[in-house]
Amino acid sequence: MGAPLILLPGMMCDARLFAPQTDALPAQVLPITSADTVQALAAEVLAQAPARFALAGLSMGGIVAMEVLRQAPGRVAGLALLDTNPLAEAEAVKARRAPQMEKAAAGQLHAVMRDEMKPNYLTDGPDRDAILALCMEMALSLGPDVFIRQSLALRDRPDQCDTLRAYFGPALVLCGRDDRLCPVARHELMHDLLSNSVLEVIDGAGHLPTLEQPDRTTEALRRWLQLT
C-alpha cells in the first residue's frame, strides 16, 4: 500500500458511502459539509490531511478533490476521481439550484431528495431500494443547512480542466456505466486530461459504484493505491 488514503463523499453523503471500501482498505473519510465554496472546503480538507496523501472523491467529493489538487498539488500522491465532473456547472443545472434550496429551507428536504435527486443516482439492480434508503438516511442526517451550503458550492465551482492537465501523478478515473449525472464521456475527458491515468467503467452501476458494485470499485482503488 502506498500513501495514506483520504476519501471525500458526494453531496448529502457521509462515510457510509464508502463503507465497503473502508472495511477493506485503510482510509480516512473527511466531511465536506461546513462551507459554501469548494475553495473553503478544500482548504479544510488540507488542514486535516497528512502532509502527503492519496485522494479519492466521488461526485461532489471529486469536485472538492480537484480543488485540493489545485491548491496543493505537491501533497497529492495520487488522485482518484469517481463519478464526477471537472467542468463548471451548466446553466441548466444552475437554474434548478435556487428552487431546491428554497424547498430545503422550507422543510421539504425529504421531498427534494425523493423527487429530484435520488431518481438519478442508481441503475437497476437487486440492492437498489436498500441503497436509495441509505441515501435518504444520509441526507436527512446532514440536514437542510448542509444541502444549501453544498448546493452553493457546486453552483459556483470553477472549471478544473487546467488543474487536471497539470497533474502527472498516478490517477484513477472511475464511473458506473449507467451514471446519468456524470456520464462516461465526462470521465473520458478527465482520462484524456490526466496523463498518468487509468479509466475504469463499472458495469451494473450508476452514480454510486462504491455501493452498487463495491467489490469491483474497491479492487480498482486497491490497484491505483499501489502506484501512489
Image (cartoon, rainbow, N blue to C red):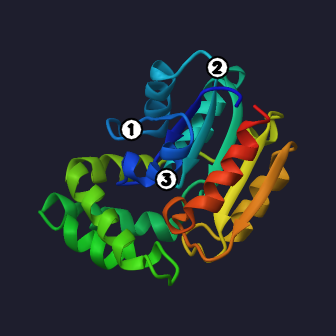
- Residue type marked 2: Arg
Of label 3 and label 2, which has the lower sequence position? 3
Q: Residue 111, image x and y in percent? A: 22, 74
Which numbered dot is residue 52?
Answer: 2
Residue 140 lies, with reference to residue 169, above or below; the image says below
Instruction: Estimate how packed mark 2 is, as few (under 14), some (14 to 19) or many (20 or more) residues with alpha carbons within 10 Å.
Output: some
Of label 2 and label 1, which has the lower sequence position? 1
Any part of residue 160 in sight: no
Question: Residue 213, located in which quarter of the rendered image?
Answer: bottom right
Any part of residue 194 in sight: yes
Name the secondary structure under disc 3.
Answer: helix
In this view, the residue in front, 153 or 20, is 20
Instruction: Estimate how packed mark 1 is, as few (under 14), some (14 to 19) or many (20 or more) residues with alpha carbons within 10 Å.
Output: some
> How far apart, in angstroms, are the residues tagged by discs 3 and 2?
24 Å
Of label 3 and label 1, which has the lower sequence position? 3
Q: Nearer the viewer, mark 3 or mark 1?
A: 3
In this view, the residue in front, 25 or 178, is 25
Which numbered dot is residue 66?
Answer: none
Task: Check disc 1 and report the residue beneath it.
Answer: 31
Going by the image, does 27 lie left or right of 137? Answer: right
Q: Residue at image x 81%, y 45%?
A: 194
Going by the image, does 149 lie left or right of 160? Answer: left
Q: Residue at image x 35%, y 73%?
A: 130
Residue 1 lies, with reference to residue 189, above or below; the image says above
> How far apart, in angstroms, are the residues tagged by discs 3 and 1?
17 Å
Q: Residue at image x 17%, y 58%?
A: 105
